[in-house]
C-alpha cells in the first residue's frame, strides 16, 4: 500500500516498536525495585504490589478509549496526547514523596503508555492484510522486546547504585524523545474515520464481543499475557525473599526469557506467510503449555531459580510465536474498527494480567508454589481458548477438502 494508490503510507516499524516499547519498558524497569520500595515506603508487600497491579489496570482502562477515539480522530493526534501523558506521569513518579503519589503517577504513566500499544497495532492493521499484519506485528514485537529485555537489569542497577527515582527520570527522557520523533515523522494512517459517540463506541465493542472468533483469540492472548505478567510480578519477590538473591539477580535471570520471546517473534515473522499464522499460533501455545507443566514438576521436585527461569524461557518462545498471529487475527476480523479491536484486546490482556498479579498478591508468600500454580492455570487457559479459536477455521478447511474430493 502506498500514497500513489490513495492508501496509507506504511510507517516505520522501528518507530512503531519504540512507541509500543514504552509501556513494557516502564513495566519491567520498575519490577526489580519493588522489594526496595517496601523499605522506602514502609508498607506490606501487597500494597507495594499495587505499583504493578494498578499500572496494568491503567493500561487496561486506557485502551478502551484510545482505540475508538483513534478510529474517529486519527492515530497520530491521539498517540501524541498519550505520549505527553506518559511523560507527565513519569515526572510525577520521580518526584513522589508517598506511596499514594507514586501509584497515582504510575496510573497516569500507564494510561499514556497504552496509546502506543493500541495504536501501534491499529496502524499496522490500517496498512496490511491479515497474514502480512501478523508478520508486521511480529517484527514490531521482536524489535520492541529489546527495550524490556534490558529494562529489568537497568532498573535493578539504577535502584541499587543510584536511586529508584532515576528509573523514572530515564523513562521520562525516553518518552520525551519518542514524542518528538512521532511529532516529526509519523503520518496519519486512518483514512476512513468513523463517527464517534457513546452509542457508536459501545456498538463497536458489542460487535466485536458478539464474534466468537474475536472472543476466543482475544481471551487466548489475554491468558498468555497473564501467565507472563504473573511470573514477572512475583519472581523478584521469590528470588529476593525466598531464595535470598540480590534484586539485580532478577534482571540477569529474565534476560534469556526476553531473548527467546524475540526468537519466537522472529519465527512468526519469517514463517507466518509460508506456514500460515494458524499453525504457528497452535504450535506456540502447545510449547508454552508444556513448559508450564515442566515448571510445576521441577518446582515440586526442587524449587530453585533454574526451576523457574528455564521453563519460562522455553515458554517465551511459544508466546512469541502465538501472540502476533492471535492479535493479527483479532484486529482483522472487522478492519473498519481495527482501533477498537486493538484497544479491546489490550484491555483484556491487561485486565486479566491484573487479576493474575492480584491473585498472587493475596496468596501466601511463604512458598513458590502459589506463583507456579497461577502461571500454569493461565497457560492452560490459553491453550484451551486457542484450540477453540482455530476450530471454525479447521472445520471450514476440512469441509472444503471434502467438497473437493466429492467434486
Image: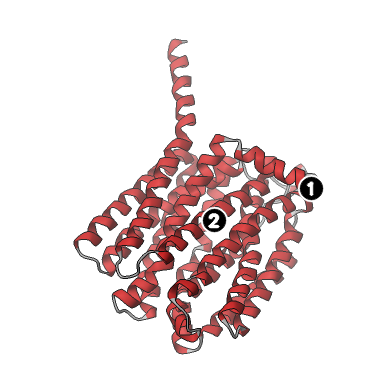
Tell me which corner region of the image, top left, top right, bottom left or bottom right, holds residue 160: bottom left
Mark 2, secondary structure of its residue? helix
Report crowding for label 2: few under 14, some 14 to 19, many 20 or more residues within 10 A (C-alpha): many
Left or right: 359 as drawn, with respect to 56: left
- Decide: is 292 above or below 131: below
- Decide: is 49 above or below 244: above
In 3D space, how far apart are the residues under numbered discs 1 and 2 (Cα atoms)? 24 Å
Q: Earlier in the sequence, mark 1 or mark 2?
A: 1
The residue that label 2 is drawn on is: 351
Labelled pair 1, 2 in contact (Cβ < 8 Å) = no
Q: Residue furthest top?
A: 407
State the count of labels. Answer: 2
User: Between residues 262 and 217, which one lies in front from this camera angle?
Assistant: 217
Residue 172 on image: x %, y %: 63, 77
Tell me which corner region of the image, top left, top right, bottom left or bottom right, holds residue 391: top left
User: Between residues 326 and 212, which one lies in front from this camera angle?
Assistant: 212
Tell me which corner region of the image, top left, top right, bottom left or bottom right, holds residue 205: top right
Residue drawn 51% across and 69% down?
52
Residue drawn 35% across and 66% down?
364
Report crowding for label 1: few under 14, some 14 to 19, many 20 or more residues within 10 A (C-alpha): few
Q: Residue furthest left?
A: 301
Left or right: 342 as drawn, with respect to 403: right
The residue that label 1 is drawn on is: 197
- Quadrant of the frame with the N terminus: top right
Q: Is residue 282 among what the camera can see?
A: yes
Residue 303 on image: x %, y %: 24, 66
- Decide: is 215 above or below 223: above
Model colouring: secondary structure
Residue drawn 26% across and 63% down?
307
Amino acid at each position: 500500500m502506498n500514497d500513489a494508490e490513495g492508501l496509507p503510507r506504511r510507517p516505520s516499524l522501528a518507530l512503531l516498536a519504540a512507541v509500543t516499547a514504552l509501556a513494557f519498558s516502564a513495566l519491567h524497569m520498575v519490577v526489580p525495585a519493588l522489594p526496595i520500595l517496601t523499605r522506602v515506603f514502609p508498607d506490606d508487600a501487597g500494597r507495594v504490589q499495587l505499583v504493578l497491579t494498578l499500572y496494568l489496570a491503567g493500561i487496561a482502562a486506557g485502551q478502551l478509549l484510545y482505540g475508538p477515539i483513534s478510529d474517529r480522530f486519527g492515530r497520530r493526534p491521539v498517540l501524541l496526547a498519550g505520549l505527553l501523558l506518559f511523560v507527565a506521569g513519569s515526572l510525577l513518579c520521580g518526584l513522589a514523596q508517598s506511596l499514594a503519589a507514586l501509584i497515582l503517577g504510575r496510573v497516569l504513566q500507564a494510561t499514556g503508555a497504552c496509546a502506543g500499544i493500541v495504536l501501534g497495532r491499529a496502524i499496522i492493521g490500517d496498512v496490511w492484510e491479515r497474514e502480512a499484519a501478523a508478520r508486521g506485528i511480529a517484527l514490531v514485537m521482536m524489535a520492541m522486546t529489546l527495550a524490556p529485555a534490558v529494562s529489568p537489569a537497568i532498573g535493578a542497577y539504577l535502584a541499587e547504585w543510584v536511586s529508584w527515582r532515576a528509573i523514572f527520570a530515564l523513562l521520562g527522557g525516553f518518552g520525551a524523545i519518542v514524542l518528538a520523533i512521532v511529532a516529526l515523522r509519523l503520518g496519519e494512517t486512518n483514512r476512513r474515520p468513523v463517527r464517534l459517540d457513546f452509542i457508536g463506541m459501545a456498538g463497536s465493542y458489542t460487535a466485536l464481543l458478539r464474534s466468537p472468533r474475536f472472543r476466543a483469540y482475544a481471551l487466548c492472548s489475554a491468558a498468555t499475557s497473564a501467565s507472563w505478567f504473573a511470573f514477572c510480578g512475583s519472581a523478584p519477590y521469590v528470588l529476593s525473599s525466598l531464595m535470598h538473591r540480590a534484586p539485580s539477580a532478577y534482571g540477569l535471570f529474565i534476560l534469556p526469557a526476553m531473548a527467546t520471546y524475540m526468537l519466537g517473534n522472529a519465527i512468526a515473522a519469517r514463517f507466518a506467510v509460508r506456514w500460515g499464522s494458524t499453525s504457528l499460533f497452535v504450535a506456540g501455545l502447545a510449547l508454552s503449555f508444556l513448559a508450564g507443566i515442566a515448571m510445576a514438576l521441577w518446582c515440586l521436585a526442587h524449587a530453585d531459580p533454574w526451576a523457574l527461569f528455564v521453563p519460562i524461557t522455553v515458554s517465551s518462545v511459544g508466546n512469541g510465536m502465538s501472540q502476533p498471529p492471535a492479535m493479527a487475527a483479532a484486529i482483522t476480523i472487522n478492519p473498519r474498527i481495527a482501533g477498537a479491536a486493538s484497544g479491546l484486546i489490550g484491555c483484556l490482556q491487561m485486565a486479566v494480567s491484573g487479576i493474575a498479579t492480584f491473585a498472587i498478591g493475596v496468596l501466601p508468600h511463604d512458598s513458590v508454589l502459589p506463583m507456579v500454580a497461577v502461571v500454569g492455570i493461565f497457560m492452560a487457559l490459553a491453550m484451551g481458548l486457542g484450540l477453540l479459536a482455530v476450530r471454525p477455521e479447521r472445520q471450514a478447511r476440512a469441509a472444503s477438502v471434502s467438497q473437493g474430493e466429492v467434486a
